[in-house]
Amino acid sequence: MKDKLSTESYKGVRDFYPEDMFIQDYIFGIMSSTAERFGYQKYDASILEPAELYRAKTGEEIVNEQTYTFTDRGDREVTLRPEMTPTVARMIARKQREIPLPIRWYSIPNLFRYEQPQKGRLREHYQLNVDIFGVPSIEADIEIIQTAHTIMTNFGAEQQDFSVYVNSRKIINTLYDVFDFEEEKRHKISKLIDKKEKIPKVDFEDMITDICGDTSKDFLKTISSTKNIIAKIGENNEQLREIIHIIETLSKLGITNVTFSPLLMRGFDYYTGVVFEVFDNSKENNRSLFGGGRYDDLLSIFGREKIPAFGFGMGDVTIRDFLSTHNLLPTYKPQTDVMICIADDTPFESISKITSDLRASGINVAIDFSRKKIADQIKRAEKKSIPYIICIGKNEIDSNNFTLKELATRKTTLGDVFDLAKVISDKKELTQKLSN
Amino acid sequence: MKDKLSTESYKGVRDFYPEDMFIQDYIFGIMSSTAERFGYQKYDASILEPAELYRAKTGEEIVNEQTYTFTDRGDREVTLRPEMTPTVARMIARKQREIPLPIRWYSIPNLFRYEQPQKGRLREHYQLNVDIFGVPSIEADIEIIQTAHTIMTNFGAEQQDFSVYVNSRKIINTLYDVFDFEEEKRHKISKLIDKKEKIPKVDFEDMITDICGDTSKDFLKTISSTKNIIAKIGENNEQLREIIHIIETLSKLGITNVTFSPLLMRGFDYYTGVVFEVFDNSKENNRSLFGGGRYDDLLSIFGREKIPAFGFGMGDVTIRDFLSTHNLLPTYKPQTDVMICIADDTPFESISKITSDLRASGINVAIDFSRKKIADQIKRAEKKSIPYIICIGKNEIDSNNFTLKELATRKTTLGDVFDLAKVISDKKELTQKLSN
């Protein structure tokens, strides 16, 4: 006959069992409710996109080596989206004239990259994308950074747990202007600076020397400190004034962990202005968590008029690692409130009225149909972390009096269905209030 | 330079603009809350699965011609899941010994089929999957049909709007036993009966004659009516008694639109017992909506012990068509409660306190940063269907007194931030109550 099949998932992707799903829903819930609090509307699209969408403006590494791209049965080249920004730009470009500006949108798409799975990097992950379109002023930059920051604090993080670094692509470009670097050199240096932390200092300096020749010594000295960079571009540089204004305004809004970081690049080529990055300050997980920036040119790839845009993407895998490192993950609670345990050979019909009444009162009810011993049924409910049980036999049905047992405390309540529903509802409401 | 890119999505998939997303969230919300009411826990998995998962027990047509299957860069064959049941079976098989039975799980995965897009059939759709594992008795069958039925009524459908048809694979098999058909014939006839409504009567009869030879006349006469089938298998047939018991029990639960339909097949090969289908009774959309059934053998493909299972899959595209046909779709409301319109050249810092206070009171607030004329800003808010606006200028900030305007009624309220937040909250609560 057949060989037996493996029960493993595909490499680098995740199965979400109810316990994992609970965490995922919690993370998505905080992301969504915070984005909505700042006036963002939810959108979505398919994971399948025409491959040419990613040939235009994305960082090259991703298109060439890391996408899932294949040819469909109709000979079309299709890519599993590696990021959401080209999709959102496509959607905005399509209805540019119908949707009044400003457009505030968010989504939590799953994204795909073919790479060796490792901690914090999987082949499929989810990423909150928050974008504002149609606001050229830095008020958009401030609002987006504030939104990202509020998501972190809504997760329970303190400001000392993480740092926000800001920079502007224009500051880097001014610096390149000062050194009179041509386009190709700029591109190479930017890529190198983006990877600076991942390569040994000596190698980095060698590679810069290869690219810059004579000026390398001066350039390396300049980029060795923020002070030197500011000295080079001048304190009155317009973009520098902008960055300082952003940091000061955020500070007035109570956001005090923001620092100017003139070498911050952020991978993608389409950024045109301010970029930012959120960094985990913990020793165990000292790494970049997520970031974003301004991309005012992206819609031009569709031949449409440009719309100023600013956005960020926050991945679920890195955020989960952050929450776990800082002990901020919630404890699993199933969606089910109560398990009905059926005693003796009570038929299904006899318990259907009480379950219907409980459900009509807003209670989530599961039934154990096994007819095992009550003690065994209770054990099964406990193993599922279901908070309450009601055991029903002939006596209960005849008297219309039931016993609700809270499994954690073994506390019991006697009453009719509506009395018991109220006990469960009140407890749920109380728990919800305490967790807010 | 570059050619301009198309703004079209990939063929046969959908972009969800906020208005579409609102409907999608409504549909998913009713599906989830109803499944949870019956004690089901949410799970999920990746759309990427090893291709061999679909070679085992799925209907052949789907594996060979209709899947998105490709080879990844590591030479693994990968399929974009065309259905969720093999995935859930894989996940259960993997932790069979850890999770106590009964297992009640639901998910709303997106599924992929390569086919010509047409009304009600796209290349990507979402499908609620509700499954119960570990209950061999027909109590599971009844509970699942009740859950499916409750979702329909929670959408606002009346019982006369749709029909539920039930059958058992075992009844068909008994009929085949009576006719002494061998395995291969059974398979061919079942496929043919499954397509009966889609082919002309004459063709159907010719094809049956081809397969059955001498007995075809008797067989065709038998399957021409439920009465004839019952006569053939005998009124005391055990499976027939079971079906009648299911229909009677559902009727006691208030579910009265269920009919025995002995030729109901439901596509997939893995069904082993009772199957059911929900059908739209409307003239405009007179078609099968969704269905499910018992599949007690599926876990054996993983070399594990069998677990009795019953489940159904409800697609979002067909349900949306049903809701639209029966006028049951809700009207779009954005998640944003209020748009702040900034008068004159009031700086961002000045309005940040009122927006923070509104947000802290649970109000979803967007800001128009355009500095356009107030009348234009109001028009833009109206076009976005945002229910309220607050215009803020120097006077408002100095007096700490703001005017809230409800755009639909032009009704205004004067007060401080917390007064206004209360007006918005109360209205939201009222609307929510009315819609329950």
Image (cartoon, coloured by chain):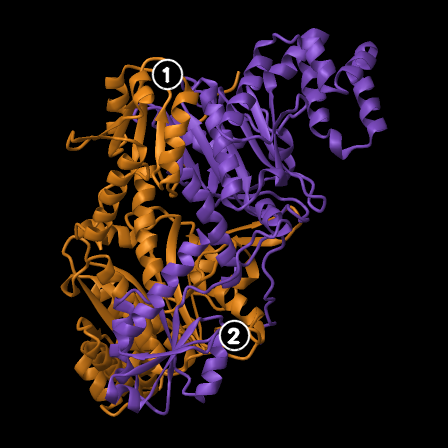
Chain colours: A purple, B orange
Q: Is residue B161 visible?
A: yes
The residue nearer to you, when weighing A28 against B231, is: A28
Q: What residue type is disc 1 on?
A: Thr
On the image, the x and y values in percent for residue B37 come to 33, 66
Tell whether A412 sits left or right of B242: right
Tell whether A4 sits left or right of B291: right
- Residue in the image at 16% along x and 65% along y: B159
In the rendered structure, find residue B346 and report the number of the disc placed on it: 1
Q: Residues within 10 Å of mark 2 (few under 14, many from 20)?
A: few
Spatial separation of the CA atoms under disc 1 and disc 2: 59 Å
In the rendered structure, find residue A383 and report the number of the disc placed on it: 2
Q: What residue type is disc 2 on?
A: Lys
On the image, the x and y values in percent for residue B106 come to 41, 63
On the image, the x and y values in percent for residue A372 come to 44, 88
Q: Quadrant of residue B270?
A: bottom left
Tags 1 and 2 in contact by the CB under 8 Å rule?
A: no
Q: What element does badge 2 sit on?
A: helix
- Residue in the image at 31% along x and 82% along y: A402
Q: Are marks 1 and 2 on the same chain?
A: no
